[in-house]
Amino acid sequence: MERGTRDEAADVHALEPEAFLEEVHSFEFWFQSVQGYLAGLSFGHRPDVHGAPLAPDERERLVTVLCNYCVGETAALEGASGLVAIAPNRLTKVFLATQVADEGRHLEVLLHRLAELGIPAPESEIERRASRSLLHFKRRLRELVESRDWEAAIFAQNVILEAMEFTVFQSHARTADLVTREVLQGIVKDERRHIGFGENELGRRLQASPHIRARIGEVKKELDHWVLESFEETLREIGVPNEERPELGRSYLEVVARLGFA
Amino acid sequence: MSDFLSMYSVQHWLESCPQGYLVGTEFGHPPGESESELIVSDPLLREQAIGTTVQLVVGERCALAASSGLINSAPDEASKRFLATQTLDEARHVEIFTQRLFDLGLKKSELESAIEQYANPNLMKFAEVLLEKVDRKDFVAGVVGQNVVLEGMAFSVFEMMYAGSQTLNPKFAHTLSGTIADERRHVGFGENRIGSLIQEHPEKKPAIERMQKEMSYYMLATFADSFRNNPAREEFKKLRMSTSGAPKAEWHGADLNALEPEEMESLLADTVLKEFKVRLGRIGIEYQTPIRP
């Protein structure tokens, strides 16, 4: 199977379940996937794309939003790297390693975008502008990973956090300046893969051990408040009109609902 | 520090590794290449190749656990991002060496039992010493153990194997060449990043030096187990003789095809220890001579 030449959709879904997992959790699969949309980009966007100058208040709002995206991506990087240690087998470890590199890239392109917007010391700016609810979520995710609770941690990381980022980034990309849009679109493509892994891994476990459901339900109940609050804050900053916000909240909840957590 | 760390960015890694020397490869080698028929068709040599590859998988599993485990204790974002790329490099190494086991005829269902059967206990001890530092979130000791000691050892072992495989087994040599390029980057990060941290935390030196001495002993014991009393010794001789007339397998001035196993062990051990001494000196750690098994 040569890289970049395979018709991914035709091949992968024709595989037996075990061979499917062997394939989609591999470095080779990751490489084929990202090569298609990262080739030729520099820090997440085409080098010759430049955004139009932003008005001061627009720039200010964008910096706050990007700072909070950095908090989310740092949480994802720390969460995914911690999950490698507790992953139950070789294939999940390898997949999570690809996710670790993805999250590292997301953090890097967002920091780079902040630098392009004239933020000289992004780390202190992030600390200053970070949302309280997002920081709480980050802390709680890390606790779940450190407690070595595989199912709860995968749920918080690859379902809740990734679904939240997916929904927000996708929505923001529609109205963002050209550079930010390309950066976010690249991230969204990665998030789709991460959510797929979370749903697949957790879905199989829930099917095999239904008693896990109650514990995951508790985690969801606890995290929902922080997620929805940071959701609301971010959507307000990126200028999503009031009437569209519940719709976006619903599409986030739909991802979670696919696993049976309404 | 930020200028130096920009050389270790995810963007730099993407351009040099996946979009650089890995382009056109499949599990680290050009598509269509296969294991040497000489090895696959000889039961003793095949078993020897499986045993050796298991040690590589064990080492890379340890490196994957260590690099991912160090991310959460890294003191700055740029180091976290470099370790994210290293985590994926190590996972790739686990994958390509595991694939080699399958290429040598191991069934997927036999993988874990083969690893249990062939994993060298001294290599497991080597890994334990390092992972204990990682578990304690000791970033400085963890990076020295991982990116200087473990990666330094892997770099020399892979280089020697590469030299020995170029003629006998080009597929394996190609697989190794990408890992050597990766290890060079990892060792570079370890040396460059950790020097300043050692200066900031001189109190950590004695424990790090003890760790290096301990890890070095287990490394030498692993080499000894691999080269001495090797049941495939006579088979290897045959294999080497079959390459007479082929170019020399030169490494550090010696022709590997002409060396006895004990001489190879000695060459490898001396090379790795010499490299340790130089690299540790650069970061301000005094090299500790290990006990020879």
Image (cartoon, rainbow, N blue to C red):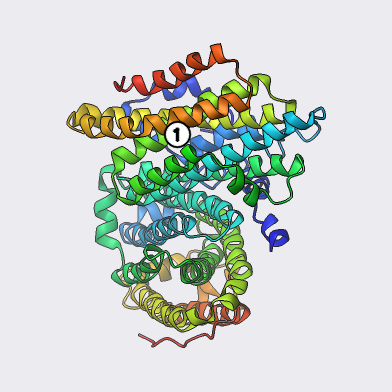
| Residue A95 point in image, percent of width and height | 43, 40
Q: Nearer the viewer, residue A171 or B226?
A: A171
**x, y percent for residue B243:** 52, 64
Q: Residue B191, relative to residue A213: is it above or below?
A: below
State the count of labels.
1
Three-letter amino acid code at the position of disc 1: Leu
In the rendered image, the residue lying farthest to the top is: A243
Residue lying at 38% horizontally and 29% vertically, measured from the top left? A224
The residue carrying mark 1 is A161
Q: Is residue A224 left or right of residue B23?
A: left
Numbered disc 1: secondary structure: helix
Q: Chain of mark 1?
A: A
Q: Is residue A36 visible?
A: no
* Nearer-the-camera pick, B207 or B11: B207
Q: x, y percentage for residue A60?
A: 71, 35
In this picture, is A222 found above or below B139? above
Query: Within 10 angstroms of label 1, few (less than 14), some, or many (20 or more) residues?
Result: many
**Residue pictured at 80% horizontal, 31% vertical:** A50
Q: Residue at x 32, y 27 (%)?
A: A17
Whether residue B236 is visible:
yes
- Which of B22/B212 is in front? B212
- Decide: is B111 above or below A199: below
On the image, the x and y values in percent for residue B221 come to 36, 78
Q: Quadrant of the C terminus of chain A?
A: top left
Q: Is residue A259 left or right of residue A54?
A: left
